[in-house]
Image (spheres, helix red, strand yellow):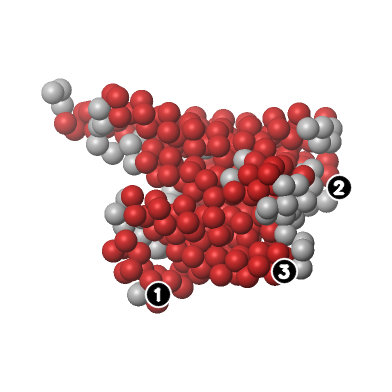
């Protein structure tokens, strides 16, 4: 990654932190929607409908209309995006349901696992080499999942489904030749007809919550910016920050969700604490390996280019 001016690097770091903070605090956006009476399906419908409007504005701002037309005319690309839409819809829907039914801690575990699962998938699908530290991180995370299952008395299906669906989503999006903004717009566009149909059905049967009260309307309208806003920040920051920095920042979101879950009184036994300890240790090893690798790459580049 080429060097960026100090001011741009600082702004990119701020954008990256803001992105993951918003993702981490998103339970506090979806929970008031649930408290207003909206279930996960209705909230998902609002994410699709308002998301496509915000995403369209983003595409226009980024001047990617031509790319959108190219993607919509390419059936192969559309098939990949249809698959990614199904995966992200599953991820969004389960996350919304979980944070509104007292399972925020399980969502936190899922997103702690995500970067470690990405590493494993990279080795499996793309023949990427996993370092010894990476193997240790994956082993620690696996131990954490097993202990979490023992603590819960069942498999942590919410955590595993969130981690697997989002990791698979990332793999699919690697195959799509489109910018993040364009891809999100097409995904929301594919979801929007079903979302709009569901909202109309709810309204006709007097079961919708949009317009039922100022509070409900406000929070449901927030489904658009909370869907698109963090992605804008992420897309801008990721192009300007070292991958090691992005790797560190991605643990902000599940940490905030963890704090929210504990603060809201979700069951947190000592065994569950130990399971998170293994996850955190795995994350720490992951970060240490990423930082070491980045430092080695910088030193190698410096030795090749010589003093300026």
Q: Circle 3 — which element?
A: helix
Q: Looking at the picture, tell me which residue is in the foreground, 133 or 255.
A: 255
> Residue 76 bears which disc, if any?
1
Q: Position of residue 144 (x, y in %)?
A: 71, 40
- Residue at 59% across, 49% down: 221
- Which is more N-terminal, label 1 or label 3? 1
Vertical placement of 283 versus 219: above or below? above
As drawn, the residue found furthest toward the right would be 153
The alpha-carbon separation of the residues under discs 2 and 3 comes to 42 Å
> Residue 281 bears which disc, if any?
none
Pointers 1 and 2 in contact (C-beta within 8 Å): no
User: Mark 2 packing: few (<14 Cα in 10 Å), some, or many (20+)?
Assistant: few
Q: Looking at the picture, tell me which residue is in the foreground, 235 or 153.
A: 235
> Residue 153 bears which disc, if any?
2
Vertical placement of 12 versus 99: above or below? above
**Quadrant where the C terminus is found in the figure:** top left
Q: Position of residue 78 (x, y in %)?
A: 43, 71
Q: Looking at the picture, tell me which residue is in the foreground, 193 or 205.
A: 205
Given this view, does label 3 or label 1 mark the residue nearer the observer? 3
- Which residue is denoted by mark 3 in the rendering? 204
- Which is more N-terminal, label 2 or label 1? 1
Q: Circle 2 — which element?
A: loop
Q: Position of residue 132 (x, y in %)?
A: 51, 39
- Residue at 28% across, 64% down: 66
Q: Quadrant of residue 157?
A: bottom right
The alpha-carbon separation of the residues under discs 3 and 1 comes to 37 Å
């Amino acid at each position: 990654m080429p060097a960026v001016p100090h001011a741009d690097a600082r702004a990119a770091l701020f954008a990256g932190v803001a992105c993951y903070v918003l993702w981490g605090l998103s339970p506090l956006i979806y929970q008031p929607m649930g408290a207003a009476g909206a279930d996960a399906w209705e909230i998902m419908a609002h994410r699709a409908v308002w998301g496509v409007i915000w995403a369209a504005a983003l595409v226009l701002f980024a001047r990617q209309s031509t790319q959108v037309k190219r993607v919509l005319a390419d059936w192969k690309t559309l098939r990949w995006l249809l698959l990614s839409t199904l995966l992200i819809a599953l991820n969004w829907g389960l996350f919304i349901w979980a944070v509104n039914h007292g399972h925020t801690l399980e969502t936190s575990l899922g997103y702690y696992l995500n970067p470690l699962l990405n590493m494993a998938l990279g080795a499996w699908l793309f023949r990427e080499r996993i370092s010894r530290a990476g193997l240790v991180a994956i082993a620690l995370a696996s131990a954490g999942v097993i202990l979490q299952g023992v603590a819960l008395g069942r498999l942590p299906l919410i955590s595993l489904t969130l981690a697997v669906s989002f990791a698979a989503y990332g793999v699919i999006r690697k195959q799509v030749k489109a910018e993040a903004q364009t891809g999100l717009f097409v995904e929301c566009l594919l979801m929007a007809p079903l979302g709009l149909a569901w909202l109309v059905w709810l309204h006709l049967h007097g079961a919708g919550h949009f317009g039922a009260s100022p509070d409900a309307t406000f929070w449901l309208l927030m489904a658009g910016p909370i869907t698109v806003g963090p992605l804008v920040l992420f897309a801008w920051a990721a192009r300007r920050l070292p991958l090691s920095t992005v790797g560190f920042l991605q643990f902000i979101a599940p940490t905030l969700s963890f704090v929210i879950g504990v603060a809201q009184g979700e069951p947190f036994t000592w065994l569950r604490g130990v399971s998170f300890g293994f996850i955190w240790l795995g994350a720490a090893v992951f970060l240490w390996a990423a930082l070491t690798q980045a430092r080695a790459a910088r030193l190698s580049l410096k030795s090749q280019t010589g003093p300026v």
